[in-house]
Image (cartoon, rainbow, N blue to C red):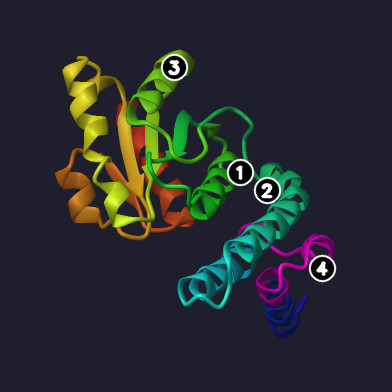
Amino acid sequence: MNVNAEANLIEEIVEATVKYDDKRCVDLARQAMDQGMDPVKVIQDGYSRGMQIVGDKFATLEYCLPEVMLAADAMDAATEVLKPHLMKSHDHDSQGIIVLGVIQGDIHDLGKNIVKIMLRAAGFTVHDLGNDTPVRQFIEKAEAVGADIIAASAILTTTMSYMPDISTILNELGLRDKYMIMLGGAPVIADWAIEVGADGYGEDAVEAVEVAKNLMRKKRGG
């Protein structure tokens, strides 16, 4: 597939996502795989970029919540097509166990869902706690599944204030050395994340995967 044709298909994916056309999104995902495109690129440059535009339209009141949810459903349907292709290029042995969720008070999980897909594609076992997740639930789940990493995201500045509690409560329970902590989300920046006790910060899904891999190397003494 030549560069121009690939770029055109990516733009069609962005447009279909913004228009929350689930059938078109699925058809384009199949077309991209039939033509040998990189599924990671399809997600990152296509569906993820489309969802960013949807998020911008929601922020400017051009879109309402139902339209955002329809776009998210369209992206989810397309990623179901892409998942088998994502997994083919990775070792199926788990790279580590991650408990992932959106921090309490926050229901915005589009970014978290993309991170989940990318982490699983990279070989991580991911336990998704969904959105509006109390801090202690992260810890309880991590204990239950023997997690290596606790990862939390936030979209609102008001909810990111709960993030420091993860490290604080782990310290209180004598469990801080047992887990790596990853933080992310639109209002979060790297310096702040480290300042409040995180071991790593991911600006986007691709970076989150690399950070998770680095944390696992550090945890395993590599």
In the rendering, at what x and y percent does residue 34 appear? 84, 62
Q: Are marks 1 and 3 in contact (CB under 8 Å)?
A: no
Q: How far apart are labels 4 and 2 at the CA level?
A: 20 Å
Considering only order in the chain, which callout, 3 or 1, is on the residue closer to the N terminus? 1
Q: Which residue is mark 2?
A: 86
Q: Which residue is mark 4?
A: 24
Task: Give the residue type that dot 1 points to.
Answer: Ala
Q: Which residue is mark 3?
A: 146
Q: Crowding at label 3, few (<14), some or many (≥20) Cα neighbours within 10 Å?
A: some
Which secondary structure lies at badge 3? loop
Q: Which residues are magenta?
A: 14-40
Residue appearing at x 59%, y 27% in the figure:
93
Residue appearing at x 55%, y 78% in the figure:
62
Residue appearing at x 56%, y 48% in the figure:
113
Q: How far apart are labels 3 and 4 at the CA level?
A: 40 Å
Choose top left, top right, bottom left or bottom right for residue 72. bottom right
